[in-house]
Structures are given as structure tokens and as C-alpha cells.
Image (cartoon, rainbow, N blue to C red):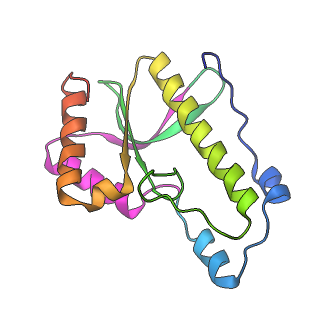
Amino acid sequence: MAGLRLHVMTTDEARLISPPASDEGTRRSMMSNRRADTKPEVAFRSMLHRAGLRFRKDRYVKFERRGVKVDVVFPTQRVAVFIDGCFWHRCPEHGTMPTRNYEYWLAKFRRNMERDAANDENLRELGWRVLRVWEHEVKDEDLARHAVDRVVLSVKGGEG
């Protein structure tokens, strides 16, 4: 995958292939999704802060041609932490598949997963350590503690 370049669709391109919402409730729900400062992100950042870590949030890291917004960044230690939603990033335990517009969602989720993999690889090629935390991990006290420990270890110089 070295040298992988990913085309990120513009909003206009996405509108051309996105089917209309199946109903008004779905449309409102989809429009209310946030790109940053989601409840799991805010909760996890709070846990990291209580663990004594200081970081940058929603920071842009530039690659050769493009970059990525990272949810939690430790720039000096070059550690990037993503808090991934179970639905959007296809959690193997909790990722559900909508029944309507199946082909659209299948392609959408495939693009998300390919983009995540490309971002991880690009960051690693630049010397960053990349950690991904699932939304459901943040919601479970024991899993959240383990995820915080992984970040602490990575920031302090371990593998994470």
C-alpha cells in the first residue's frame, strides 16, 4: 500500500451519488452527525486529561498531498489517537448495516475503511504511532481504562 493515494470526494460529488434519506427522521439524524467533538471524543479526552495527559484536539496532520484531522494528538511524541464510531468505521462487534440503500452504504463503508487504512499508513510513514479507540470502548469503564492505558503507554514511549 506504499504510495497509496486516496481520492476524497467533494460534497458536490457525494450529492451526485448519495440517495435521498428514506424519511424525514433519518434525514434529520444524518444531518445532526458531528465530525468533531462527539460525545465519545469529549468523554475520552476527559479521561486522558484526568490521567494527567495534555494534548491537542482535532489537529490537522499534513501528508505529501493531503492530510487528516486527528481526534487527539500528542505532537511532540508523534502519537495520533482516533476515536472511531462503531457505525461509521465498521466495528466488528457493533457495526450495523442499514437495510435501505444497501449498495450505497456498502460502498460508503468501504471508502471509510480504505481511508482509515490509508491515513494510518501515511501517519506511520511519517513516524507517528497511531491508536484507534472504538466508541463502545469509551462507554465501558473497564475497556475505557484499558484504552487510556494504551494511550499513556504510547505517549510515554512504549508501543501502545
Q: Furthest-right residue in view?
A: 16
What residue do we see at 47% from left, 55% from top?
A: 36
Q: Is residue 86 left or right of residue 15?
A: left
What residue do we see at 71% from left, 40% from top?
A: 8
* Residue 38 in which image quadrant: bottom left
Q: Is residue 36 magenta?
A: yes
Q: Position of residue 143 (x, y in %)?
A: 23, 52
Q: Position of residue 71 (x, y in %)?
A: 42, 45
Q: Which residues are magenta?
A: 35-62
Which quadrant of the figure contains the N terminus?
A: top right
Q: Is residue 34 left or right of residue 27?
A: left
Q: Is residue 160 magenta?
A: no
Q: Is residue 22 left or right of residue 126?
A: right
Q: Is residue 147 above or below residue 128?
A: below
Q: Is residue 126 above or below residue 61?
A: above
Q: Position of residue 65 (x, y in %)?
A: 66, 24
Q: Furthest-bottom residue in view?
A: 24
* Residue 6 in which image quadrant: top right
Which quadrant of the figure contains the C terminus?
A: top left
- Total marks shown come to 0
Of 115 and 102, nearer the camera is 102
Of 54 and 80, nearer the camera is 80
Q: Is residue 160 left or right of residue 117?
A: left
What residue do we see at 56% from left, 71% from top?
A: 32
What residue do we see at 66% from left, 69% from top?
A: 99
Q: Position of residue 98 (x, y in %)?
A: 62, 67
